Image (cartoon, helix red, strand yellow):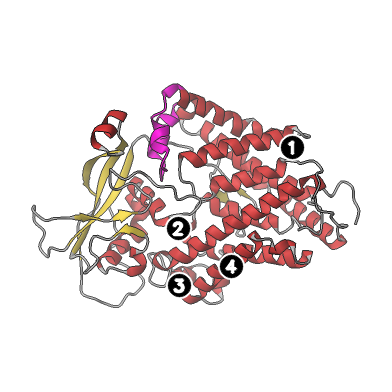
Amino acid sequence: MEWEWFAAPDYWLSRLVLQRGLAAVYLVAFVSAALQFRALIGERGLTPVPDFLRRVSFRASPSLFHLRYSDRLFASAAWLGAALSAAVLLGAADRVPLAVSMAMWALLWVLYLSIVNVGQTWYAFGWESLLLETGFLAVFLGNADVAPPLLVLVLLRWLLFRVEFGAGLIKWRGDLCWRRLTCLDYHHETQPMPGPLSWFFHRLPRPLHRLEVAANHVTQLAVPFLLFLPQPVASFAGLAVVATQLWLVASGNFAWLNWLTVLLAFSAVAGSPVAGAPAHGPTPLWFGAAVIAVTVLVAVLSYRPARNLLSRRQLMNASFDRLHLVNTYGAFGSVTRVRHEVVIEGTDEERITDATRWREYGFKGKPGDVRRLPRQYAPYHLRLDWLMWFAALSPSYAAPWFTRLLRRLLENDPDTLRLLRTNPFPDAPPAHVRALLYRYRFTTWRELRSTGAWWDRELIGPYGPPVPRRPAEPDTGTDTDTDAS
């Protein structure tokens, strides 16, 4: 098929960057799932998949695991996805026929969809839907056999538009501090998981914080419209998105959200013919028909997300179909002014007194030890650490799983302990564990120099009563004492 309007050969390098980068994100996502699922959603996890599958039908949450679930099958699916992602990252999808390449991308999408749709609260993040939506469109981007299809590039820009414009609108409509340009007086300190530079971003002069917010509004509310203009304007708009997303990468840990947004921005960046550019063959009729069909499907499914953008009751990070094909996005419609953290401690003393010595569990990413500089983990996603931030905001949010987490620590459960940085009871499990609520704030320059501490914390009080170790008993998959407040 030779339709001059259909092919966009000048975007071959952009497609290469987007596809290889997407394969890298898939690889991180599948490895994250493989290494963390047993403690979170495994058969003895905090919210077990088998319990979820008994309550939810395939139609409500499509997943291959409705056919059969076991931890071994989940691990096999996750590691298969990781291996296939690595192969695509190394160029395997460009060395096979077009139909096989599409099948490889489709299998990645099906495997990850199956994980997300049984992942429950641990997978209820906007970047899961973003990965699935991008991964679905990547099936139809083609490989080295054909020129990039213009329609799919436009669909990717439409996705990028919803990511950026949706985030801009939710901020403008939400917290007043975004309109007053003051939100970054708090955000770098109170974001879910600060990174190693977050302390320094927080300590920037306030006029620079105002400039950051103003630049964010321009990038998210004005620049997205430029993505659909002729070149080179669209390329400049895409590169502007790349620059702002890299700023966000440096200032915090948001899993693969920012990296995926960077990759999507390349759908708007056109190159120019250069030596070594691949010579694409003609576009097969069946491939052109598939691309057109998908374009029509996305256009139809875009009605509700587009209406959501225009609504005063705009939803944030919502899916309007069970396959996560066309979603709505957004982040930080409200900004927390004060940072609270749940700190978990244990003791090996059988009787608790005022003199009882408690020892603290250390998490990998979330703040704990005040002298420990926050680490960079993104694009890897520490799911338990992220949900501990939500637990500090709302005990009721954590109620379905928090008490079970404490029970697992009382057992020295190896899968659970692998999610933590330190276990103060390596030889024998503790007799009691408890959770305390602290207020955390970044130290000042003077405090940092005098104490070496990046954080200062103040005890607010108990997050719940101490939980004692109980005699071993069969795990029924449910806990009756799930009130974490």
Give the mark toward the camera: 1 or 3.
Answer: 1
Looking at the image, which residue is at 75% across and 50% down?
152
Query: Number of marks in the image?
Result: 4
Give the mark toward the camera: 1 or 4.
Answer: 4
Residue topped by disc 4: 83
Does residue 461 lie above or below 337 as drawn? below
Residue 19 seen: yes
Residue type at the position of mark 2:
Trp
- N-terminal of the pair, mark 1 or mark 2, is 2
- N-terminal of the pair, mark 1 or mark 4, is 4
Spatial CA span between label 1 and label 3 = 45 Å
- Disc 3 crowd rating (10 Å Cα; few below 14, some 14-19, many 20+) is many
Horizontal side of residue 141 vs 168, given as left or right: right
Residue type at the position of mark 1:
Phe
Identify the secondary structure beneath mark 4.
helix
Residue topped by disc 1: 228
Give the mark toward the camera: 2 or 4.
Answer: 4
- N-terminal of the pair, mark 1 or mark 3, is 3
- N-terminal of the pair, mark 2 or mark 3, is 3
Image x and y of residue 58, in percent = 57, 69
Q: Please report the bounds of the magenta region as a residue range.
A: 181-207
Does residue 26 lie above or below 370 as drawn? below
Looking at the image, which residue is at 45% across and 65% down?
35
Q: Residue 122 has which mark?
A: 2
Spatial CA span between label 3 and label 4 = 26 Å
